Image (cartoon, helix red, strand yellow):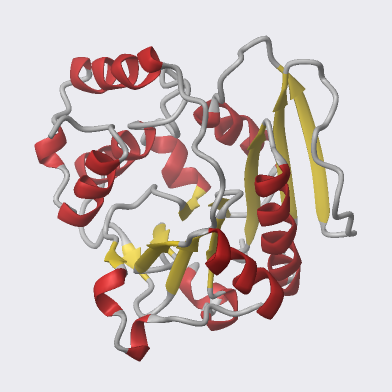
Amino acid sequence: MHSDVTIVIPIFQLDQYRTRNLDFILSRLISTSKRIVLIEQSTTGDPMYASIKHSNIEHLVFRSPHDKIRKSWLINTSINFIKTTHIWVCDTDFYIEYNKLNINNVLAHDFIQPYHYAKDLDELQTQSLVNNGNIEVNYYSGEEESYRHINTFGALSFIANISKFQSIGGMCEQYEGWGYEDFDLYLRVHLNTTGPQIYIVDNILGVHMYHPPSLTKPGDVTNNLKIFTEKGFNIDQIDDITLKYYYTDWGLVKK
């Protein structure tokens, strides 16, 4: 079977900032000519996102009574609607330099991180990105200290061979809300595969576009950490120090 990829974007409760960010990301992803599946979780069964329509975009809406995102469930569910060898999971607010990514070449690998460096943008920087269409301050212009070297597969944007992904259990659906589902996936990739495990596409930048902080209930992070540790995982197993500190800054790991 010829290797190909379907882009999947989980959606839940988009405000004006997240809608703007998703509009921009979709406008760039369309240029890849790959099929894009928007998979939305809705408490009413009605879609919240309706900005960009394109022949390559399919919008699926699933009704759920849950008032917090079930990202892992959305990703696993999307596989039922995919016929390609690979799935590319994209965040609604994380943009990478798609024009520098040779997508057909990277599909020779089972687990792919399509970027290596990441930076958080503020609102003015995000507006500049949307208006100009390019990342103005980049890793190559002497600003490398402002970028984080991300080596943890499963965070923000990842590509996986669907067969291999399902063989390690896919996403763990025990996690609800935000946090630890990506660490869980990362560790299971390492524990269940042999040889070269994760292919990181070097010299490609990613930026997290600004939006107001997610409304995470205080107990969500604690519950997800409890699930993570009860599965026998420990945050010290994560070898990507930068991302560990990133999570510490956001309150996912105790300082």
Query: Residue 143: horizontal and vertical position, in percent?
Result: 31, 81
Q: Nearer the viewer, residue 244 or 137?
A: 137
What's the residue at 42%, 76% (across, down)?
Answer: 204
Most distant residue in the front direction: 124
Quarter of the picture containing the N terminus is: bottom right
Query: Residue 55: percent from the left, percent from the top?
Result: 90, 59
The single residue placed furthest to the left in the displayed view is 236
Residue at 25 percent of width and 15 percent of height = 226
Residue at 38% from the left image edge and 73% from the top image edge:
201
User: Is residue 23 placed above or below 191 in the rendered structure?
Assistant: below
Residue 22: percent from the left, percent from the top? 69, 53
Tell me: residue 156, above or below residue 184. below
In-front residue for pair 84/65: 65
Residue 110 horizontal/vertical position (percent): 41, 57
Q: Is residue 131 above or below residue 230?
A: below
Q: Foreground: 177 or 102?
A: 177
At 14% from the left edge and 51% from the top edge, which residue is drawn?
Answer: 239
